[in-house]
Each structure stands twice: as structure tokens, then as C-alpha cells.
Amino acid sequence: MKSFFKSFVKSAQEVKNVRCLCVTGLFIAVSMVLEFFSIDLSFAKINFAFLAIAVIGMLYGPTVGFFAGLACDVVGYIVHPTGAFLPVYTLVAGLQGLIYGCCLYVKNDSHSLIVKNNLSGGETDITLYFRAVIARLLDVLVINLLINTRLNMHYGFIPDEAYGTAIVSRLAKNVIELTADIPLLFILLPAALMAYNRVFRQKSSPVHS
């Protein structure tokens, strides 16, 4: 628990680094571009913008992730203005960044999850992949299903029906999205971390911390 709260302090200290501000700004811009490539199916909408927030959270932690989420929502509204601007949704976007920062921050002090191959004797660190699954599940369950469902009902964006019924009706859509989201995280996060370390010539580090 102590290391969990310490990660917020470490993340806040990242803001002092010009590199953090530049990379975060870059990925906020990337999230805007990814919005254009959302796939709107009749039964689900697959949006890739969360990938940029996940990378920010992984690199710079929950504090930076929170403010990056806020910035993404504000900039996103400026770039794609639809309807009225509702600050409560901006706060929810910040919570999304907070979730990815808490789960994925590579400077967290935690134990590794190692899978050993009994045949070859080799070991594989799956910590980042495990964290990615937890982060996306929390995002979907807490943000999409619970909070956004309640807000959408409150503001009349979905039919005025029982809260539980609305959640069930949205559950299938989110499960479909997860089947695309999690593999993308598995590919992008390790690649982004490796590229970040190479570009800034950091000492090679495991993907978990």
C-alpha cells in the first residue's frame, strides 16, 4: 500500500521533466488522431484513443495520467465539438488516466509475475500484460459500465430505464470491444516502452519495474 501512494509522488515529480511534458503532449495529440480511426459498428464502437492514455500512464504514472486524461477530453471537445461541454465527463476522463497510471506505471515497486517454461527452462515476465488486462477491465467496468451509464441516463443520452437493465444492455458491447482492446495493449505497451527506452537511451529495464 505504501508503494501505491508513493507512485503518486513519483508521478508528480515526473512533471518537472521537460521530456515528460513533451512526450505526454505528443500522445495527447496521438489520441486525437486515433479518434478519427474509431470503428462504429451497429452493435459496438471500437475506439482506440485509450491506447495513448495507457502509454502515458505506463510511462509517467497516475498523477500525470489523471491530468493527461483531463487534457484529452478538453482538447478532444475542441477538435470534435459535439453537443454541450459537460465538465463531469472531463473528470471521468481524468479517472480513466488515473486507472492506467495506477496499474501500468513502470516505476511502481512491485513483484514480478514470471512464467517458467519447463521444457526450455526459460522464463517470461508477464507483469505488464497482467497489469494491462486489469487496467482495461477496470476502465470498462468502472468507467464505461458504472459511471458513464449513470451519467448518460442522468443527461438523457440513453433511454430512461432501470440502471441494472442499462448496464446489461451495454455489457455485450463492452465485451466485444475488450476482444480488440486487450490484444492491442499487449502489442503496443511493450513496443512503446522499448522504443521510449531506446530513444532516450535509458538503461534497459524490465517491463514491470
Image (spheres, rainbow, N blue to C red):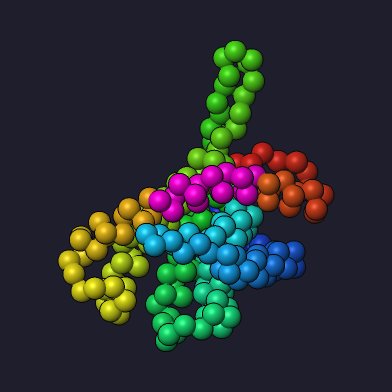
Position of residue 82 relative to residue 47, above or below, is below
* Residue at 56% over, 48% down: 185
In the image: residue 159, left or right of residue 114: left
Q: Percent position (x, y) of residue 84? A: 42, 86
Q: Nearer the viewer, residue 32 or 195?
A: 32
**Is the C terminus in the top left, top right, bottom left or bottom right quadrant?**
top right
Position of residue 9 relative to residue 92, above or below, is above
Q: Nearer the viewer, residue 36 or 58?
A: 36
In the image: residue 166, left or right of residue 104: left
In the image: residue 20, left or right of residue 138: right
Position of residue 7 relative to residue 110, above or below, is below
Q: Percent position (x, y) of residue 63? A: 55, 64
* Residue at 42% over, 75% down: 89
Q: Percent position (x, y) of residue 128? A: 57, 42
User: Is residue 63 in sight in this rendering?
Assistant: no
Magenta residues, start to end: 176-190
